[in-house]
Image (cartoon, rainbow, N blue to C red):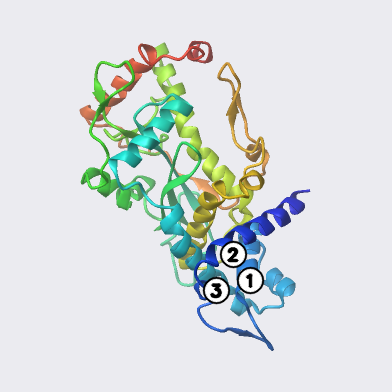
């Protein structure tokens, strides 16, 4: 049954992609004529083998037998096609919001769908476990004694990817990964057109627009994390509950990726630079398919988490999958918990709001 779904997914994706690429030329995925034995490897074949790799995670050897293409050719076909997908689809479907209006639209959607005002994204990170390249030493060696590169992604209110950074070597501390992200620098430099602090609905104090993350991140005025899970009073428990409703979007984004693109269920046996192309292509296709004619195939009923009328979590089907061999959680730091006063003040502001003007009916039962 699962393999049948993969076949349908491949057909749907191919139809949607060729509809898009037909506006250009086959050259965007076939930059030159490539010979495989006695035949030309055409654009449809190149796209099909790449999508099969992304959707199944099959080895190059297996793909070689299926498509009658050499493993050497498959290795650069996958890299080139993934690069073309990110280059030509990315500007349309995977771009960081660039205006105040776009950020406000995202914040309004978080408020309407998840009752979390002034939220502009849920951030999450994973180590992508891989086979280390020759002579890499400990450069990619991580805290779980494997080798990896790190993917940092920001999810929007409808499970879309708003931003992604991939390629940081797993040997760097997880706290340092965020500091290396271009998004962190852009937020701190105020170069993203994020609106100034705004009053929450029925609130009395303007609060800044924020990202929400888990304990792996440091608390900052623009990045909220939950309160430590000990000695919590009712107000802090409610804050953590409301925070988790928005943050869970990013967990679902990674869950969807691993469920739909099974390459993330495997340990990557490709070079780090190819991993970067593969990840960006998968994220771009994820955003593309969310808004395409194949949406119902890509997002079948029950795949993602949902809530009952009383706010109880109904786990999505992706959570029933076996654990991904590729995705490895970021390490929660044991030091560096001394957040600046302003960051704590912002979190207290949201905490006060969630138990007063911004309270929702079912939160008291969920946190009692």
Closer-to-camera residue (119/113): 113
How far apart are the two marked residues, 2 and 1, measured between alpha carbons?
8 Å
Q: Point out the residue furthest to the bottom here.
A: 38
Q: Quadrant of residue 102?
A: top left
Residue 144's place in the image compared with 50, above or below, is: above
Residue 281 spot, x, y in % from top left: 51, 59
Residue 104 spot, x, y in % from top left: 33, 35
- SS at mark 3? helix
Closer-to-camera residue (283/19): 19
Looking at marks 2 and 1 on the same chain, the residue that comes earlier in the sequence is marked by 2
Residue 228's place in the image compared with 366, above or below, is: below
**Residue that appears at 63% across and 34% down:** 316
Q: Quadrant of residue 156?
A: top left
Looking at marks 1 and 3 on the same chain, the residue that comes earlier in the sequence is marked by 3
For mark 3, what is the residue? Answer: 26
Give the label on residue 313, or none: none
Relative placement, left or right, of 199 versus 259 is left
Residue 84 spot, x, y in % from top left: 49, 67
How far apart are the two marked residues, 1 and 3, measured between alpha carbons?
9 Å
**Residue that appears at 53% across and 66% down:** 21
Asked whether the residues under the numbered discs 3 and 2 touch, taking CB atoms below 8 Å apart as contact, a structural biologist would say no
Residue 361 spot, x, y in % from top left: 49, 12
Q: Nearer the viewer, mark 2 or mark 1?
A: 2
For mark 1, what is the residue? Answer: 44
Residue 282's place in the image compared with 211, above or below, is: below
Total marks shown come to 3
Relative placement, left or right, of 95 versus 302 is left
Closer-to-camera residue (247/269): 247
For mark 2, what is the residue? Answer: 18
Say whether residue 147 is visible.
Answer: no
């Amino acid at each position: 049954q699962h393999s049948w779904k993969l076949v349908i997914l491949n057909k749907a994706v191919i139809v949607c992609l060729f509809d898009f690429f037909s506006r250009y030329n086959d050259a965007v995925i076939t930059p030159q004529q490539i010979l495989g034995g006695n035949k030309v490897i055409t654009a449809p074949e190149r796209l099909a083998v790449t999508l099969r790799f992304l959707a199944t995670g099959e080895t190059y050897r297996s793909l070689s037998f299926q498509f009658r293409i050499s493993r050497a050719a498959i290795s650069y076909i996958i890299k080139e096609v993934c690069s073309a997908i990110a280059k030509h689809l990315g500007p349309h479907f995977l771009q960081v919001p660039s205006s105040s209006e776009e950020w406000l639209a995202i914040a309004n959607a978080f408020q309407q769908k998840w009752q979390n005002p002034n939220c502009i994204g849920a951030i999450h990170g994973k180590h992508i476990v891989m086979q280390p390249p020759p002579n890499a030493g400990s450069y990619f060696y991580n805290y779980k004694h494997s080798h990896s590169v790190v993917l940092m992604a920001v999810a929007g209110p409808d499970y879309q990817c708003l931003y992604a950074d991939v390629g940081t070597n797993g040997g760097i501390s997880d706290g340092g990964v965020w500091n290396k992200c271009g998004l962190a620098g852009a937020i701190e430099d105020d170069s993203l057109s994020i609106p100034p602090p705004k009053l929450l609905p029925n609130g009395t104090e303007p609060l800044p627009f924020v990202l929400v993350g888990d304990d792996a991140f440091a608390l900052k005025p623009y990045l909220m994390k939950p309160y430590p899970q000990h000695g919590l009073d009712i107000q802090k428990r409610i804050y953590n509950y409301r925070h988790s409703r928005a943050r869970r979007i990013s967990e679902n984004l990674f869950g969807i990726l691993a469920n739909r693109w099974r390459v993330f269920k495997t340990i990557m046996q490709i070079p780090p630079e190819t991993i970067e192309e593969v990840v960006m292509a998968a994220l771009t296709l994820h955003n593309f398919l969310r808004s395409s004619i194949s949406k119902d195939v890509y997002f079948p009923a029950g795949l993602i988490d949902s809530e009952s009328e009383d706010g109880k979590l109904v786990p999505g089907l992706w959570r029933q999958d076996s654990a991904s061999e590729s995705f490895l959680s970021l390490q929660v730091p044991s030091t560096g918990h001394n957040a600046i006063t302003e960051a704590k003040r912002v979190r207290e502001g949201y905490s006060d709001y969630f138990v007063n003007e911004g309270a929702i009916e079912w939160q008291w039962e969920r946190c009692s």
